[in-house]
């Protein structure tokens, strides 16, 4: 059943992000920035659990599309923070609205008496997935099976 969820979520995310004119990676970056406000690239990479160099390319594409702004620290010219532009906030808001509507429809298909159990279970699964990711990818385990 988790594989069914994975497939359905992946399909829905691909549809939602393409409707909003961004890639899945750009979507994740926009939503993380929307939640974080102004942040360094390293901070955003940590929050999103992504490689800094990969995220840097995604952010660069968002800067070119005027969805993200770079802010240079006046005290330390080497320090750069990033945040959503006005256009970026609008795009993130549209994505959040679309997701909220989808998840509302999803919950409406589940009996109200089961909502608390579903939400608790999703929290447990999400936390477990995060813990596994933080410990290392499946590829890293295959490369070094003895830990």
Image (cartoon, helix red, strand yellow):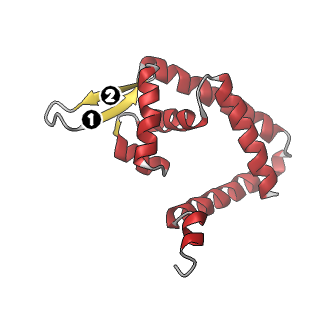
For the question of whether residue 103 can be seen, the reply is no
The image shows residue 71 at horizontal and vertical percentages of 28, 28
* Vertical arrangement, residue 84 with respect to residue 123, above or below: above
Quadrant where the N terminus lies?
bottom right
Secondary element at image label 1: strand
Q: Determine the residue positioned at 79% across, 39% down.
A: 106
- Looking at the image, residue 25 sits to the left or right of residue 51; the answer is right
Asked if disc 1 and disc 2 are in contact, CB closer than 8 Å, the reply is yes
- Residue where numbered disc 1 is placed: 80
The picture places residue 4, in percent across and down from the top left corner, at 81, 51
Q: Taking 68 as reference, is 103 left or right? A: right
- The residue labelled by disc 2 is 70
Q: Name the residue furthest left.
A: 75
**Label 2: few (<14), some (14–19) or many (≥20) C-alpha neighbours in 10 Å:** some
Q: CA distance from mark 1 to mark 2?
A: 6 Å
- Numbered marks: total: 2
In this view, the residue in front, 40 or 93, is 40
The residue under the point 42% across, 51% down is: 46
């Amino acid at each position: 059943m988790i594989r069914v969820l994975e497939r359905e979520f992946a399909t829905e995310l691909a549809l939602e992000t393409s409707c909003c004119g961004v890639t899945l990676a750009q979507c994740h970056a926009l939503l993380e920035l929307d939640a974080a406000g102004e942040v360094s690239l390293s901070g955003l990479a940590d929050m999103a659990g992504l490689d800094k160099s990969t995220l840097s390319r995604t952010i660069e594409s968002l800067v070119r599309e005027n969805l993200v702004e770079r802010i240079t620290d006046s005290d330390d010219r080497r320090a750069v923070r990033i945040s959503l532009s006005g256009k970026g906030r609008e795009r993130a808001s549209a994505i959040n609205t679309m997701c909220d509507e989808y998840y509302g429809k999803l919950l409406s298909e589940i009996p109200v008496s089961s909502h608390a159990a579903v939400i608790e279970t999703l929290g447990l699964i999400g936390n477990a997935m995060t813990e596994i990711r933080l410990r290392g990818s499946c590829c890293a385990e295959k490369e070094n099976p003895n830990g």
